[in-house]
Amino acid sequence: MVLKIDFNSDEAIYIQLRNQIIMGIATEMIHEGDTLPSVRQMADYIGINMHTVNKAYSVLRQEGFVKLDRRKGAVVSLDIDKIQAMSEIRQSLDVLLACGICRNITRGEVHQLVDEIYDRYTRASMDTEQEEDEE
């Protein structure tokens, strides 16, 4: 698993870790049923405190991306509630779009940006499928 943690960022490390894991799931580098490294292993790998990893895993559990199993640890298990997911995305986008409007970003520019980001994830997913078919 390749993680990009920016120790100089203003964003909390546990949030960066959470985001990297979600992006890994979206790009299918991490699959449903995969076991994430133990808290200790992940902390050692990144070079951070175990409590930080534990917090990231707890947030992922609360958001329905992983289940915590006493024997297996954090297992990717997507609890899909589309209505709730749409509500959460709407809340996040509401603030982001307001910020964009304040900075004179047009509707067209927002649509283009959303399409680029969405395509990046769906292309990564298609690339993964092609690689698996070739093997």
Image (spheres, rainbow, N blue to C red):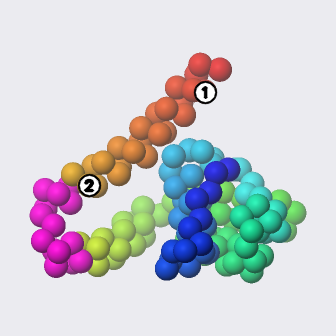
Instruction: Give the image location of residue 4, x and y in percent.
Output: 58, 59
- Residue displayed at 52% across by 26% down: 130
- Residue displayed at 59% across by 19% down: 134
Disc 2 residue crowd, few under 14, some 14–19, many 20+, Cα 10 Å? few
- Residue displayed at 27% across by 49% down: 115
Q: Give the range drawn in magenta.
A: 98-111
Reading the image, the residue beneath label 2 is 113
Instruction: Give the image location of residue 124, x and y in percent.
Output: 47, 40
Q: What element carries label 1?
A: helix
Q: Quadrant of residue 70?
A: bottom right
Outermost right residue:
71
Q: Does 93 appear above or below 29? A: below
Magenta stretch: dominant secondary structure: helix
For marks 2 and 1 on the same chain, the one whose residue lies earlier in the sequence: 2
Q: In which quarter of the image is residue 39?
A: bottom right
Q: Does the magenta stretch include residue 31?
A: no
Instruction: Give the image location of residue 26, x and y in percent.
Output: 50, 51
Instruction: Give the image location of residue 103, x and y in percent.
Output: 17, 74
Q: Nearer the viewer, residue 7 or 133?
A: 7
Q: Does 82 appear above or below 116? A: below
Q: Looking at the image, can residue 112 be seen?
A: yes
